[in-house]
Image (tube, helix red, strand yellow):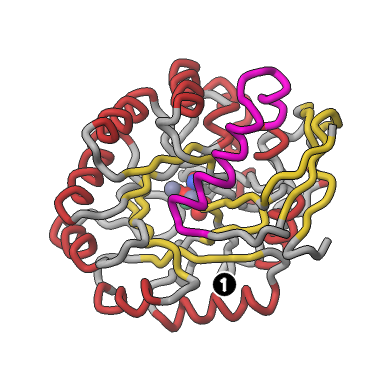
Amino acid sequence: MTLRFPGLIDVHCHLREPGATHKEDFITGTKAALKGGFTFVIDMPNNPEPTLSMEALNKKISLAKEKAFCDVGFHYGTNGLNTSTFEQAFSNPNVFGLKVYLNHTTGSLLIENQVLLEDVFKSWQSQKPILVHAEGEEKLAMAISLAKKHGHRLHLCHIARKEEVAQVQKAKAEGQKITAGVCPHHLFMTKEDAKKMKGFALMKPELGTLEDQQALWKGLRGGVIDLVETDHAPHTKKEKQNPPAGGPAPFGVPGLETTLPLLLTAVSENRLTIDDVIRLCHTGPAQCFHVSIHHNTNVEVDLDAKYEIKNENLHTKCKWSPFDGWKVKGKVLRVFLRGEK
Ligand code: NCD
Ligand code: ZN
Ligand code: ZN
């Protein structure tokens, strides 16, 4: 059976330009997005030259304008010292949120100083959400209480643990305006996979237990989780295989081309419904980040087509996927952007 979905939205991807275009760039990243059914992607600010100023933001906007094959939006970044630029940033229609890092991950945007953090939450006086990379109950609680104090719409990125799902559920029940996303790798893989795949399954947050995974699925179906975000975070095979002396491989895995087929496979196994997929990859993201998609922007999928995910068939510049060799059911056939194939 062939179905037409509205264009899918990925609110969390790392297209790596400028500064790390050996991993990905706006051309390869947005081709990968379209191949995966995403017509609108929001790029993260943790580049080697982070998006901390209007100059850096405008550079990204013009690079994307010149190169991108699908629609691209941006999350602004902060290190706690650029709050004087916030008003200009959130007034820019290309900006959809402010990204705050509460844990160490790829890039240098971690904020650990409480005074700076307070200032960040106080200064982002916009309806556009603050997104946090906050791992574990303590950091999540900190983000949730800061958002409450300053009356912010908060998006919790890549929820990955059973306790975190419970925490989100509780905060929502208390009426707080928060949304939460999960990533496909946490839905389809566990710690056990990480053992076999070494650096290739290393990401932040790290893969969890089977119990964590089950809690994520329950949260996904029950509505505690608002959206699926790919956290497409490409690194080269070489970087994954040869970590710097004494250190771990860089954190992150690509996901733009594998997310929809994996979710459609879950539909074929009755673990999700088609309506869930549309809610998690279109309606949810559109509502959380105030994105509107043109009525002639859509994705045609064949629900019955079976194929094997293969590294060599991917369009991402890094040319690998943690799901290489996985058999999926559900394939993207064609994508239309404002009516154009
Ligand atoms: C991301 C990256 O490489 O930019 N890595 C990751 O493991 N998820 C950063 C992030 O989202 O934390
Ligand atoms: Zn993150
Ligand atoms: Zn990320």
Quadrant in which residue 267 is drawn:
top right
Apparent side of residue 217 relative to residue 148 in the rendered image (left or right): right
Q: Nearer the viewer, residue 322 or 306?
A: 306
Q: Is residue 60 above or below residue 137?
A: below
Apparent side of residue 50 relative to residue 78 in the rendered image (left or right): right
Under 8 Å from ligand 1: the CB of mark 1? no
The picture places residue 256, in percent across and down from the top left corner, at 66, 48
Q: Give the SS element for disc 1.
A: loop
Q: Is residue 286 above or below residue 266?
A: below
Residue found 75% across the figure and 35% down from its top: 324
Boundaries of the magenta span? 264-291
Q: Is residue 245 visible?
A: no
Quadrant in which residue 85 is drawn:
bottom left
Disc 1 target residue: 18
Residue found 28% across the figure and 74% down from its top: 82
The picture places residue 234, in percent across and down from the top left corner, at 61, 52
Residue furthest to the front in view is: 295
Quadrant in which residue 230 is drawn:
top right
